[in-house]
Image (cartoon, rainbow, N blue to C red):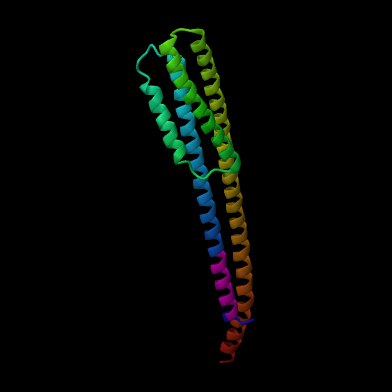
Amino acid sequence: MGLIQRLYLFTITGFVLVMIVFSLIFWFLNALNSAMEKVDYTQQVGEVVDQLQLHIFEKKLNLAYPDTNDWLTDQERFLEIVEVAPLLSPSQQTLQNSIINQNASLIILFKQIQQVSQQFPKSKIESHLNTRLLAQIEVIREDCLELVANADQSLRQVMRKLFYLIAFILVVTACGLTWGAFQLDGSLNPQLERSSKGLMKL
């Protein structure tokens, strides 16, 4: 194979390699961005659930307090967050569905406590419902913690794969450049020798 053909082959191979590398990097960066969005999303859900729990502990849903706007505002924020959830993995989606279902039960309990507290304030029924409400929010919180841990694990896996990809790219690039240098050197030396002999004859 002549020098020109080798140069063409080296150029085409390098171009194809660069395109593959950029495609892989682009794909992994998208995966990394998606994983980070999931982490942000799960943290937002966890923060809202913590706020709901905090309001319950602070007031213990003693609805002698006429103002429950804080609790209702956090509920609205929770629903807004889960409505715009990013694309989740199957296990993350299962946890999210569990959180949403548990929260629906939480809202029902909240409304029941409102009704009971108006009819039978400070009654055993109200106390029982408050206990169930605290247990319900704790279940939601545990699911949220598991969801956050799952998203963090996914992010770590993507970052590990990205590290391996960068290491692979560096190795392949070094091998490709070394191979190309040897190929060009093998073609260039005979050309230089012939040129030198031609000059000596002159």
Task: Tell me the quadrant of the picture where the N terminus can be found.
Answer: bottom right
Locate residue 65, reporting x and y percent. 37, 13
Residue appearing at x 52%, y 47% in the figure = 32
Q: Is residue 143 magenta?
A: no
Main SS class of the magenta portion in the image: helix
Q: Is residue 13 magenta?
A: yes
Locate residue 66, reporting x and y percent. 35, 15
Position of 160 relative to 97 (above/below)? below
In terms of depth relative to the viewer, which is nearer, 161 or 87? 87
For the view shown, which residue lies furthest in the front direction?
119
Instruction: Report the number of numbered marks.
Output: 0
Horizontal relation, residue 79 to residue 150: left or right = left
Position of 79 relative to 56 (above/below)? below
Position of 115 relative to 154 (above/below)? above
Task: Tell me the quadrant of the picture where the C terminus can be found.
Answer: bottom right
Residue appearing at x 61%, y 69% in the figure = 180
In terms of depth relative to the viewer, which is nearer, 114 or 144? 114
In terms of depth relative to the viewer, which is nearer, 38 or 155? 38
Locate residue 31, reporting x and y percent. 53, 49
In terms of depth relative to the viewer, which is nearer, 66 or 47? 66
Q: Which residues are magenta?
A: 5-18
